[in-house]
Image (tube, rainbow, N blue to C red):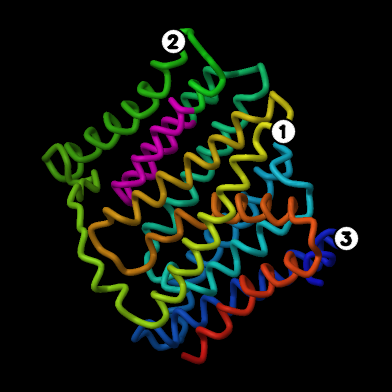
């Protein structure tokens, strides 16, 4: 079983993940874009691929560093399977970069469980999410995660609630200053597309119907057991698990209101969903059901390649 491979050999883990990510990129280019693969397109997609692969590595770092799973690295496998399910994420570099910055912020938010440098971590989280919103405005929703984390940690110091706002303000003031210097106006640097859309016609294809059904059905089912299992975790780690679930809900809301529904907006769902599903699979006692669950996650993306 592939999960047993991921529990034993880390180099093979990331070789598999790298290969699947590269396959997802080629599928995005050849199947879902009109771009011809040449030197110019390679120079364009190489940074996007690197950023996306770094996001996978960052998810692994967050999970391992904060004991969010049993250190089997299966969450990176599921993350990559989701990339292959909706490879269109590679066609929007702004969302890829924004998601990477949100994950960097998540790393700082999760690390609040340790009792040191809280002010610096909160400023960094606010600053990074503000930076992410410059590339994709609605990633600003994840700013709520900071305050939820403070709530989960029962923080009552007023300055800790103010510091993230200072980080966000620093991004806004810097952006406005650059706009004035470069364009002689206030908001040209800011990506202020505040529109929302509830038009889901773009998802009216076999690929999206199957992909969304898989992500939501598996995600919601796993979430039920994930939430039930939080009470069994060590007290110091419980806020981190709650933050991951809150991120899943916020990402789901972001997908619903996204102004342009191209499929790339689902990228924000992949990290929390991969962690939630990985935790759920670890709680399954029946080996046959665990195997079947993992097979579905890994086989569906390849089935979609031929549709």
Identify the residue position indicated by label 3 in the image.
Answer: 8
What residue is at 53 percent from the left and 21 percent from the top?
120
Given residues 152 and 121, the one toward you in this image is 152
Q: Nearer the viewer, mark 2 or mark 1?
A: 1
Q: Residue 43 vs residue 118: left or right?
A: left
Q: Give the range drawn in magenta.
A: 125-148
Query: Gap between marks 1 and 3, in whole Å?
Result: 24 Å
Indicate the position of residue 228 as horizontal and vertical percent values: 62, 40
Identify the residue position indicated by label 2 in the image.
Answer: 159
- Label 3, residues with CA under 10 Å away: few <14, some 14-19, many ≥20: few
Given residues 111 and 216, the one toward you in this image is 216
User: Is residue 57 within the magenta segment?
Assistant: no
Question: Residue 181, located in which quarter of the rendered image?
Answer: top left
Q: In this view, does 244 lie above or below 195?
A: above
Identify the residue position indicated by label 1 in the image.
Answer: 233
Helix, strand or loop status at disc 3: loop
Looking at this rendering, what residue extends furthest in the bottom direction? 306
The reply to whether the C-beta atoms of the residues labelled 2 and 3 are less than 8 Å apart is no
Q: Is residue 117 above or below residue 82?
A: above
Looking at this rendering, what residue extends furthest in the left direction? 185
> Upstream in the sequence, badge 2 or badge 3?
3
- Label 1, residues with CA under 10 Å away: few <14, some 14-19, many ≥20: few
């Amino acid at each position: 079983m592939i999960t047993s491979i991921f529990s034993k050999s880390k180099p093979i883990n990331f070789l598999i993940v790298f290969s699947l990510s590269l396959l997802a990129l080629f599928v995005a280019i050849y199947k879902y874009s009109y771009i011809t693969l040449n030197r110019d397109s390679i120079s364009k997609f190489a940074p996007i691929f690197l950023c996306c692969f770094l996001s996978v590595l960052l998810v692994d770092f967050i999970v391992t560093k904060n004991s969010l799973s049993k250190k089997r690295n299966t969450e990176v496998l599921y993350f990559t399977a989701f990339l292959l399910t909706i490879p269109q994420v590679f066609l929007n570099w702004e969302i890829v970069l924004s998601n990477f910055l949100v994950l960097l912020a998540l790393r700082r938010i999760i690390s609040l469980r340790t009792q040191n440098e809280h002010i610096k971590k909160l400023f960094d989280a606010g600053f990074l999410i503000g930076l992410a919103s410059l590339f994709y405005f609605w990633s600003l929703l994840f700013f709520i995660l900071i305050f939820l984390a403070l709530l989960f940690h029962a923080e009552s110091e007023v300055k800790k609630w103010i510091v993230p706002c200072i980080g966000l303000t620093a991004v806004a003031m810097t952006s406005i200053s650059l706009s004035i210097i470069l364009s002689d106006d206030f908001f040209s640097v800011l990506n202020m597309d505040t529109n929302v859309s509830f038009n889901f016609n773009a998802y009216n294809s076999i690929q999206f119907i199957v992909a969304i059904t898989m992500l939501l059905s598996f995600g919601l089912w796993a979430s039920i057991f994930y939430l039930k299992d939080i009470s069994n975790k060590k007290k110091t780690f419980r806020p981190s698990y709650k933050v991951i679930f809150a991120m899943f809900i916020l990402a789901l809301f972001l997908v619903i209101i996204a102004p342009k529904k191209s499929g790339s907006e689902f990228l924000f769902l992949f990290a929390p969903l991969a962690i939630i599903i990985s935790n759920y699979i670890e709680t399954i006692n029946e080996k046959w059901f665990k195997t079947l669950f993992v097979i579905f996650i890994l086989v569906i993306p390849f089935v979609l390649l031929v549709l």
